[in-house]
Amino acid sequence: MVQRSFPDESAEIAPMLVVADLARSLHFYVEQLGATAITAWDTYAMLRLGAGRLHLVTPSPGTDDKPGISLVAPTEQTRLTGEVVLHVSDCRRVVADLEARGLNFMAPPNKPPWGGEVRCFLQDPDGHLIEFSQTTGPDEPH
């Protein structure tokens, strides 16, 4: 068997979202969602959100270490290429708490037809989709 050095216990996935207005996004993620800013510069921020980290960056052209790759903020809120999923222990409780802070969800928490979770969605100011997902047993009521 081949020994591999990656991944090891230190590897952590930390999404990076491109945002049009960093101050507006920081307000959303820190003041409304409850994240903690670890680092915040003019064009970049790293946040602690629960047990994970989230990077926010403003649009930028390619760099020497990623030539030809430009970072762009979403231009449509209905055609997305991905989402950020936050696993929570009680989706309904989280939604009630965040609604009390003024956040608007796309629909009430529900169990999808395939079961196994209760989930709910909202979008950040740039349209990035955020899913709150609670893993459930197969008999969990809607």
Image: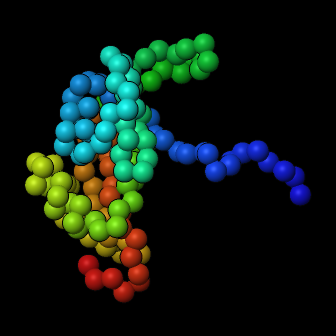
Horizontal side, residue 142 vs residue 11: left or right: left
| Figure quadrant of residue 87 | bottom left
Rendered location of residue 59, percent (x, y): 38, 20
What residue is drawn where x is 84% and y is 50%?
3
Where does residue 137 sit, x and y in percent of width and height?
Answer: 41, 81
Q: Is residue 108 above or below residue 57?
A: below
Which corner quadrant holds the C terminus? bottom left
Residue found at x 26% / y 31%: 26
Residue 42 on image: x %, y %: 32, 16
From the viewer's perspective, tell me whether residue 122 is left or right of residue 62: left
Residue at far right of view: 1
The quadrant the N terminus occupies is bottom right
> Is 118 located above or below residue 61 in the figure?
below
Looking at the image, which is closer to me, 139 or 50? 50
Q: Please tell me which residue is depicted at 21% across the width and 29% down the height of the picture.
A: 24
Q: Quadrant of residue 28?
A: top left
Evaluate whether residue 80 shows in this view: no
Kindly tell me whether residue 22 is visible in this rendering.
Answer: yes
- Front-most of residues 71 and 33: 33
Residue shown at the point (34%, 67%) measured from the top left: 89
Q: Position of residue 118 (x, y in %)?
A: 32, 70
